[in-house]
Amino acid sequence: MSLGNSKNSNSKKLRVSNNNNHKCVFLTACQAVPIFVQDIVDARVCKGETVKFECGYSGTPTPDVVWYKNDKLVTNTKNVKVQYLENKTSITVLSATSEDVGTYTCKATSDIGLAVTKAKLYVQGMKHQ
């Protein structure tokens, strides 16, 4: 008898064999609630500077991940870029202004749970030339 990961990381495969070389395979599903393995943190930048919030997450099944600013959904614009890559996501403000000040929230949701990480962005004065 052996227990190991199958090709699908969401399940474990149990193999049972007897002396007659008959084999049975049983699959068991594994689930894990979403969690952030890297939270976002508050940032203070000068006007015109670039700032990036980045976080890492996990969960099985893979959670849906969405960004918010002051509880409003964030989408890509000329000045704001949202990226998703494997189990990391980020939001980048290319040239911070007073309009970008606020609380940024990243939510990871799945059928079995929800995880949230939050940080504030502060923009001060003018960038030094």
Image: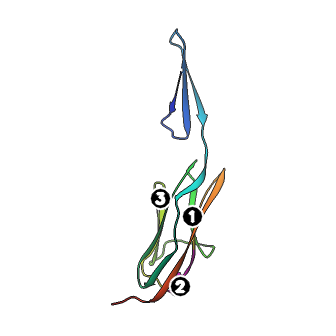
Q: Which residues are magenta?
A: 98-103
Residue drawn at the location 45% of the way across and 81% of the way down = 45
Nearest to the observer: residue 113 or residue 43: 43
Residue denoted by label 3: 88
**Residue 29 position (above or below residue 56):** above
**Percent position of residue 90, x then y:** 47, 66
Residue 85 — which label?
A: none
Residue 66 — which label?
A: 1
Quadrant of image for the N terminus = top right
**Residue 50 position (above or below residue 86):** below
**Residue 49 position (above or below residue 119):** below
Looking at the picture, the colour scheme in use is: rainbow
- Could you classify mark 3 by the number of other residues whose Cα lies within 10 Å: few (under 14), some (14-19), or many (20 or more)? some
Quadrant of image for the C terminus = bottom left
Residue drawn at the location 57% of the way across and 64% of the way down = 66
Tag nearer the camera, 1 or 3: 3
- In terms of sequence position, does the residue under pointer 2 or pointer 3 come before the other? 3
**Percent position of residue 33, x then y:** 62, 50
Residue drawn at the location 48% of the way across and 62% of the way down = 89
Q: Residue furthest right?
A: 112
In magenta segment, residue 36:
no
**Residue 38 position (above or below residue 76):** above
Task: Look at the numbered disc 2 and give the secondary structure of its residue.
Answer: helix
**Percent position of residue 109, x then y:** 62, 57
Residue denoted by label 2: 99
**127 lies left or right of 68:** left
**Percent position of residue 24, x then y:** 56, 20
**Amino acid under label 2?**
Glu
Task: Look at the numbered disc 3 and give the secondary structure of its residue.
Answer: strand
**How many labels sit on residues?**
3
